[in-house]
Image: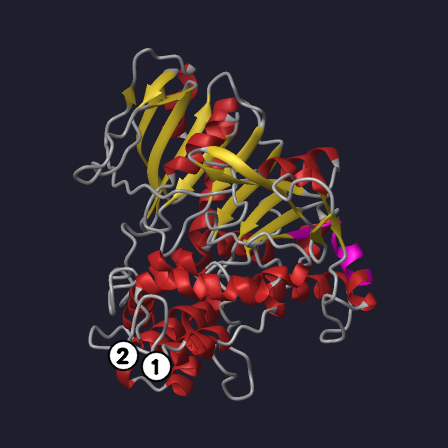
Amino acid sequence: MTRSLLVSVFAGMLGVLFLVAAPALASPSCSHIATLGIPDTVIEQIAAVGAGPFNVPGPPPPPGAPKREPVMLPAFCRVQGHIKPAIKFEVWLPYDTWNGNFEEVGNGGFAGTIQYGPMIAALKAGYATASTDTGHVGGGTEWAPGHPELVMDYGYRAIHELTMKAKTMIEDYEGAAPRLSYFNGCSNGGRQGLMEAQRYPNDYDGILVGAPANPWTAFELGDMLWHTLATMKDAESFIPTEKLAAIDDATAAACDELDGTKDGLISDPRKCKFDPSTLVCKGADSPTCLTAKQADALKMIYAGVPPVNGKPVFPATMPGGERGWGNFMTAGGPMKTTSFNLANNFFKNLVYEDPNWDFHSWDYTKGVADTQKKLSSVLDATDYNLKPFAMHGGKMLMYHGWSDPVVSPLNTVNQYKLMVTALTGAKPGTFDQETAAFTAANEKAQDTIRLFMAPGMSHCGGGDGPSVFDAFTPLTMWVEKKQAPQQIIASHMTNNKPDRTRPLCPYPTTAQYSGQGSIDDASNFACKAPVSR
């Protein structure tokens, strides 16, 4: 597990006593946090946790799964509580290993859990760290109807409130305020990071943003619901998991070598012109071909939702890495996939607050207007002006996998361009990634923001391409040493061993093969301006 990837472990904890775990290695001031009188904050439990094995909270593993082993942690003060009305949080404060800095970690999906995995990584690295469930328990949306205050907490308030409260606790326990503060999130966590930079630009000095679903309403409309409409409105259109390998092989055959290197990866799927009609079965249906309706559904996915009232909604899913679609778009069968569940939860409980809502009879055009009118101002991180964030020296490092089936990578590319435009004063709509105008504007903006695209990487990690990398350390080097990241080395792992490495490059440059040596060795690639073929 790398610092840049997030894991989610469900925890529902509530305590009313102050506990001290033996051996009690934390300072006596650990319990003093409860006397601070932090506004709107209820401290439920404080524990001075000694160095050694720590049992990670969470439900028991499912039958047949490996037993969850304790993790070795340094001594720390563990603070649990909630911020009114219902924002549960944990703050972990290192005893004698503090590096002077703070790292808050983001959530995925609809949140609802404390993120112990990233907190453990942060604590081991010496950071004071914090996480919140954003105001509700569990990854569904049953909490939303009739509770706009909880929707607001999920949308933006919870992260900011915890940031402020955690800094107060850090200063009390450690004897000094954090020297520097970082936020680290992917998916919804990426949205949270962008929301922080836009609404509260002074909260953080460095923000790591992975695969952000930052226009959350458009993401639900144009990815979650669009995938559902493409594959489930007609039962014969559903594409079963066993056909994904054939689709993946076909897109690779059509587009792998567009970058000049045959390596099983599509470096820039925007250039891929794969036609799903070429996979239509010429005889009986089988796992190696598509029915006509399945091919039409695939075309619909690659094309993306058309503009509504002349305005784009959300970019399309890119060709490549289709083997990785299973856990999201096909696993479980119709009406059971992750994409359907996310869309169903969102529209039923947040948009319409109607348990009988059904996408089959939904008016898409009217629904876009309904959704964005009600929720855009609360959920969407789409104020692209990062000048206030840049003015205090803030740095933002973004990353996204080109084979992400959850959040279209084109969304991040588009958001990045809009932020470059706002930072530099370049006239909107006058450049794209290949023009001299964009290059000039991008060079100016790269003092504040950089984007790294990962060919073959799925959502926040995984996939056929090199997807294991540390993006957090380059961010800290940029903030603390003024050393802007020129590349990030990523690895592809098989049986926990790297079998391919590749540099990830600052957008719009791409990793290009030197023509000599192994294509599995990052040293034989260099970041250069993209080639046109």
Within the magenta stretch, is there residue 444? yes
Which amino acid type is marked by label 2? Glu
- Check the image and report above or below for 345 versus 12: below
Q: Quadrant of residue 162?
A: top left
User: In this figure, which residue is indicated by the disc labeled 2?
Assistant: 236
> Mark 2, residues whose alpha carbon is within 10 Å: few (<14), some, or many (≥20)?
few
Q: Is residue 414 left or right of residue 336?
A: right
Residue nearest the viewer, comparing 392 with 212: 212
x, y percentage for residue 323?
41, 57
User: In this figure, which residue is indicated by the disc labeled 1?
Assistant: 293
Residue occupying the point 38% across, 50% down:
134
Q: Quadrant of residue 131?
A: top left
Within the magenta stretch, is there residue 360? no
Secondary structure beneath disc 1?
helix
Give the residue at the far front of this rendering. Answer: 283
What's the distance in space between the residues labelled 1 and 2, CA to CA? 6 Å
x, y percentage for residue 147?
30, 64
Query: How many dots with numbers?
Result: 2
> Mark 1, residues whose alpha carbon is within 10 Å: few (<14), some, or many (≥20)?
some
Q: From the image, which quarter does the C terminus lie in?
A: bottom right
Q: Quadrant of residue 374?
A: bottom left
x, y percentage for residue 234?
28, 81
Residue occupying the point 29% across, 43% down:
10
Nearer-N-terminus badge (1/2): 2
Tell me, yes or no, whether the two marked residues, 1 and 2, touch with CB atoms within 8 Å.
Answer: yes
Q: From the image, which quarter does the N terminus lie in?
A: top left
Start and end of the magenta stretch? 440-451
x, y percentage for residue 514?
75, 46
- Check the image and report above or below for 48 versus 305: above
Residue nearest the viewer, comparing 455 with 113: 455
Could one spot residue 383 in this view of the protein? no
Secondary structure beneath disc 2?
helix
